[in-house]
Amino acid sequence: MLLKKRSEIVAKVDQLGAHDPAEVANLGFGKRIGDATAYAVERMTDAYQARTIYATVTDINQALERIEEGTYGRCVSCGNLIPDDRLQAVPWAALCVPCSAKPGKSRIVR
Ligand SMILES: [Zn+2]
């Protein structure tokens, strides 16, 4: 399930990666100013999405490492089991709900 999710997200990253500067330059030709502005806004959104996706890919890779270690499904902060419903919503969740709610503890890196 995680592998499937990861391949979906990696495909999405590839899709976003297609928006390279050369492509943007080509799209700029023969278009009205308004289109260029809309495209610039779209690019900003893409950049934001790309950062979010890269962060998610990192989380998924860490989750896959935890599967190999046999620690998957346990909170990396307190060691408690992460509830199944949370794992189904966020399969790469590294923290249990109480720990993820703690300020400043949402991005724990071991
Ligand atoms: Zn915890």
Image: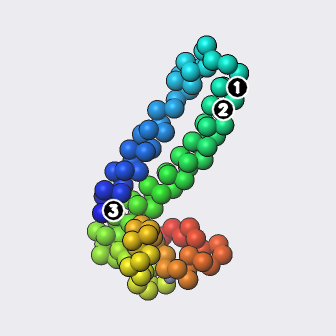
* Picture coordinates of residue 94, whole percent (x, y): 46, 72
Label 2 element class: helix
The quadrant of the picture occupied by the N terminus is bottom left
- The residue carrying mark 3 has its beta carbon less than 8 Å from ligand 1: no
Inter-mark Cα distance, 3 to 2: 35 Å
Residue type at tag 2: Ala
Label 1 element class: helix
Relative to 56, 28 lies left or right = right
Q: Residue 2 bears which disc, if any? A: 3
Q: How is the image coloured?
A: rainbow
Q: How many marks?
A: 3
For label 1, the residue is: 34
Residue drawn where x is 56% and y is 67% of the image: 107
Above or below: residue 90 compared with residue 32: below
Residue drawn where x is 52% and y is 80% of the image: 97
Inter-mark Cα distance, 1 to 3: 41 Å
* Picture coordinates of residue 90, whole percent (x, y): 44, 68
The crowd level at tag 2 (other Cα within 10 Å; few <14, some 14-19, many 20+) is few
Residue type at tag 1: Gly
Q: Quadrant of residue 12?
A: top left
- Is mark 1 in CB contact (under 8 Å) with mark 2? yes
For label 2, the residue is: 38
Residue drawn where x is 65% and y is 25% of the image: 35
Inter-mark Cα distance, 1 to 2: 6 Å
Q: Earlier in the sequence, mark 1 or mark 3?
A: 3
Residue type at tag 3: Leu
Residue 32 in sight from this viewpoint: yes
Label 3 element class: helix
Residue drawn where x is 35% and y is 74% of the image: 72
Q: 62 or 83: nearer the eye? A: 83
Q: Earlier in the sequence, mark 3 or mark 2?
A: 3
